[in-house]
Image: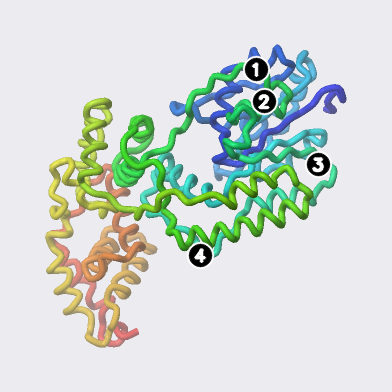
Amino acid sequence: MPIDMTKRIVIHAGPGKTGTSAIQHWLNSNRETLSSEGIYYPEHQLDANNVSSGNLYSIYDRLTSGMLALNTQKLLNLKRDFENRTESILLLSSEFFFLRVVELLEVFPEAEFIFYLRNPIELFESNYNQGVKRQQNTEPFRLPERVNFKVFSVLGGLLEHDKNIKITIRPYSKKEFYKGNIVNDFLNILSVGSLKVETTKINSSYSLEALEFKRNANFFLEGSDAIELDLALQAYNLGEFNYSLITPAKFTKQKTLVLKQLDGFIDKYDLSHLISFRDELSSLNQKNYKKQSATLGMFNSVLTYIKQEHPNTFNKLNKQVRSNINYILPFQEFYSLFDVDSSMRECDEKLEDHKALASTLLTSSIKKPADVCREIGLFLEQKGQTSLANEFFETAYSIDPKRPLIIRKINAYYQSVFKSNEDKPKTSNIKQKLKNTKKRFFSGKSSKS
């Protein structure tokens, strides 16, 4: 169904971590005001954090595989609805549209697209923080040695795909925002920048102390309980906020790469309006570098706040921590905050037995016994012998406790046990279990392979 040529379709496509939550919250909360200005913004749901997928599900479905698929009936209904309305602009917003623009151009060939461009280095840290906040990430921050700043290639690809594409690229920078606010800036693009804007801070950043607390707590809370803790930590206003987890040397290296790619992007596509943004990035100083670590003092302050301000959340976390003592945490003394002795891991009681067995079962010609135990554990895991596999992972951990893969496997095992409501694995018979598998895995010849 073609759209009346007097009407416009404007699609805000993010990308992520460029203020989309703040923009969508304001748009969704002010639909009547927008309508009076001739802008139709379809309503959508917001979660407990006032965050959403925007208008994604106005035209897409999420398949059981997790992939997104255009729903032609939804699309037809939306176009028909817009055609019958008095507003002259259909406005859609979702950061998930960022990688779907070519597909959207096929169904909305007349559409205009809005993007915000953020310093890619900031994005790496912001995305990591978001992973800890919302995706239960427990891994430490790692910056790849070779960073691919995808935003430049994606936007460049769009500009080359269709020379006539109607596209607005705005810098994500408070200094560059119209009236110093991203919502005002966005509305100004739509020529309604005079609208009164009162914004609510959405998806507030954590302090470093809150980030590390949440990284450890992610082992224990899920679903609505994790959301409750996230909301509580967003309101925690003590500690270090002006920090970076990137070493100064890596920051300098990546900054040089960003400027080089940005210069090429501006020159190639004649985007002179981004030069002031480029100059701002060039003069940008790194935030205070902080090594990603924690102390009991840091965590005690956070926990005291949660106890006082969010006792229900504290009680849930306390119960789960005390019921699950086998995790190998980023900061193992996190357990002591809840009066749990971190040395009481069931398998830790048998560490000396683990080491003695490894020494007995593995011949002296094997230079890296932790690797052997790891490979046997992976083999058993593939065969569905998860409990026995974990015994070998625990043995590998007792030999070398600094192996990230082994730690992840052990934690994943105990998490699966917890989720399936099985009894905690008993390790008192580990010596017998390993002896019973000696003939299968540690024969004289195979032990040397």
> In the rendered structure, which disc, 2 or 3, sits on the residue that comes first in sequence?
3
- The mark found on residue 165 in the picture is 3
- 194 vs 408: above or below: above
* Front tag of 1 and 3: 1
| Residue shown at the point (26%, 25%) measured from the top left | 309
- The mark found on residue 195 in the picture is 1
- Say what secondary structure mark 4 lies in: loop
Q: How many labels were placed on the picture?
A: 4
User: Viewer-proximal residue, 67 or 105?
Assistant: 105
Counting from the top left corner in percent of width and height, residue 226 is at: 35, 35
Task: Answer few, some or many: residues within 10 Å of disc 3's Cα (few below 14, many 20 plus, some between 14 and 19).
Answer: some
| Residue shown at the point (48%, 61%) measured from the top left | 250
What separation in Å lies between label 3 and label 4 (alpha carbons)? 34 Å
- 277 vs 112: above or below: below
| Residue shown at the point (26%, 52%) measured from the top left | 331
Question: For residue 360, which quarter of the picture?
Answer: bottom left
Q: Is residue 267 left or right of residue 439?
A: right
- Say what secondary structure mark 2 lies in: helix
Q: Is residue 19 left or right of residue 74?
A: left
Kindly identify the amino acid type of the residue bearing the numbered disc 3: Ile
Q: Is residue 431 visible?
A: yes
Q: Is residue 219 visible?
A: no
- Say what secondary structure mark 1 lies in: loop
Residue contact between numbered discs 2 and 1, judged by CB atoms under 8 Å:
yes
Kindly identify the amino acid type of the residue bearing the numbered disc 4: Glu
- The mark found on residue 151 in the picture is none
Circle 4 sits on which residue? 145
Kindly identify the amino acid type of the residue bearing the numbered disc 2: Leu
